[in-house]
């Protein structure tokens, strides 16, 4: 009783004040009801669904006749899909393939599509080449990102991808190859592809989510392929929004190696270990690409090579001729129009499969002069 009488009234008031203050602060806590959470979920899902479509309208993208996906954006499959849609909307013949179609060692105005447009007398061909897209990756690119239907497709087959078991992805030892995100993640099995199941599942899911592909595009095109956190750490004093108004990088080219063609550089002939066509994984995927395009109502014309046979010894030439013969037999049997040209002059190659500008010009003339290619471009150019 005496202790209670000695209790400090001011201390009691301070204690009560603290309790009241704590109660007062807690009264401002935001508690969402079930309906509120539903609204948040709808808004979030709407953003995830609409952001890619809105960005498609905001981002300036007006590819000219010689446009090709910038080399540094070779893994930007969202941009590739957009380029493909625009080319389809403009009624273009789509030239699809790897770095040979892209024009790895020449500027855009010396690529195959440039000369096809020039010699056909009309701007009707679009460069849908993408660096490093071996047939296994190309099939995935067409299946998941291109969305081609009812179009004419000039599809290029680069025999280089069958020139060894490693190029053909047959080796059991793991190695990192181009565009692993485009190949089948579960079936058919690729022996050298050893990604974890979790990674494979993430890749498979991301293919079906436009928002994830759009985010990857933003990172590749504007932030040097870095995520937001990494970019801000690398550029602590820059506004993270500033790169966006800069626009997409230009459609630049990869310069030709110093010394010009392989002949000028004194390169030696190669000994290649060609795989059997019947057992080739890359040939299997190339056939799947053709069948996929046809199933979507596309008209397919196949261009094979021309591989630089000048670099091969006699045994390799025989193996390569067997592959060409087998490819031609399958294409004719399946009623796929094709052109398998003779090798270009030796001085027209940079390496085993990439021509110099004069090589592309000659190849375009040869292609357009074939009777079976009349549906691609109409007028046949005259020889010089």
Image (spheres, rainbow, N blue to C red):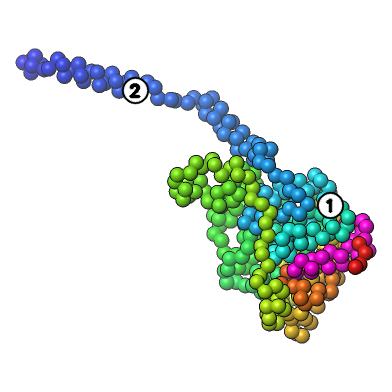
* Residue bearing the label numbered 2: 25
First along the sequence among labels 1 and 2: 2
Tell me the crowding category of disc 1: few under 14, some 14 to 19, or many 20 or more residues within 10 angstroms, Cα based. Answer: some
Residue in the picture at 24% in, 18% down: 17
> 363 or 30: nearer the eye?
363
The correct choice, above or below, for 204 with respect to 170 in the image is above
Residue in the picture at 52% in, 48% down: 227
- Asked whether residue 289 appears in the rendered view, the answer is no
- Is 244 covered by the magenta stretch? no
Res 96 → quadrant: bottom right
> 214 or 256: nearer the eye?
256
Q: Are marks 1 and 2 in contact (CB under 8 Å)?
A: no
Main secondary-structure element of the magenta-colored stretch: helix
Quarter that holds the N terminus: top left
Tell me the crowding category of disc 2: few under 14, some 14 to 19, or many 20 or more residues within 10 angstroms, Cα based. Answer: few
What is the secondary structure assignment of the residue under circle 1? loop
Residue in the picture at 71% in, 67% down: 282
Residue 168 in the image, given as x and y percentages of width and height: 68, 70
Residue situated furthest left in the rendering: 2
Instruction: Measure the C-alpha gap from mark 1 to mark 2.
Output: 69 Å
Q: Which residues are magenta?
A: 355-380
Residue 71 in the image, given as x and y percentages of width and height: 65, 58
> 201 or 335: nearer the eye?
335
* Residue bearing the label numbered 1: 123
Q: Does residue 47 appear left or right of residue 124 in this picture?
A: left
- Is 372 covered by the magenta stretch? yes
Q: Nearer the viewer, mark 1 or mark 2?
A: 1
């Amino acid at each position: 009783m005496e202790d209670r009488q000695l209790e400090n009234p001011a201390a009691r008031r301070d204690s009560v004040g603290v309790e009241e203050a704590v109660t007062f602060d807690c009264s401002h806590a935001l508690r969402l009801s079930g309906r509120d959470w539903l609204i948040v979920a709808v808004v979030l899902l709407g953003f995830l669904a609409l952001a890619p479509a809105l960005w498609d309208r905001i981002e300036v993208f007006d590819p000219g006749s010689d446009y090709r996906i910038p080399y540094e954006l070779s893994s930007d499959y969202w941009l590739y899909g957009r380029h493909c849609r625009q080319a389809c909307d403009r009624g273009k013949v789509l030239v699809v393939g790897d770095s040979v179609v892209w024009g790895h060692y020449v500027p855009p105005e010396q690529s195959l599509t440039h000369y096809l447009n020039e010699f056909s007398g009309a701007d009707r061909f679009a460069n849908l080449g993408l660096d490093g897209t071996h047939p296994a990756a190309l099939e995935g690119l067409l299946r998941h990102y291109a969305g081609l239907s009812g179009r004419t497709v000039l599809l290029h087959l680069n025999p280089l991808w069958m020139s060894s078991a490693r190029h053909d992805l047959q080796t059991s030892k793991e190695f990192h190859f181009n565009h692993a995100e485009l190949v089948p993640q579960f079936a058919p099995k690729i022996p050298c592809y050893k990604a974890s199941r979790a990674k494979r599942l993430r890749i498979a899911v991301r293919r079906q989510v436009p928002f994830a592909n759009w985010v990857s595009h933003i990172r590749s095109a504007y932030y040097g392929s870095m995520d937001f956190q990494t970019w801000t750490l690398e550029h602590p004093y820059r506004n993270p929004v500033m790169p966006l108004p800069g626009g997409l990088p230009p459609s630049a080219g990869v310069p030709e190696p110093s010394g010009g063609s392989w002949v000028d550089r004194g390169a030696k002939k190669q000994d290649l270990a060609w795989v059997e066509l019947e057992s080739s994984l890359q040939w299997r995927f190339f056939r799947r690409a053709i069948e996929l395009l046809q199933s979507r109502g596309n008209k397919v014309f196949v261009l094979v090579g021309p591989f630089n046979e000048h670099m091969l010894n006699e045994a390799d030439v025989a193996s390569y001729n067997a592959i060409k013969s087998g490819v031609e037999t399958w294409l004719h049997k399946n009623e796929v129009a094709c052109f398998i040209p003779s090798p270009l002059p030796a001085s027209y190659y940079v390496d085993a499969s990439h021509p110099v500008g004069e090589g592309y010009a000659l190849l375009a003339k040869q292609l357009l002069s074939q009777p079976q290619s009349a549906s691609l471009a109409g007028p046949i150019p005259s020889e010089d």
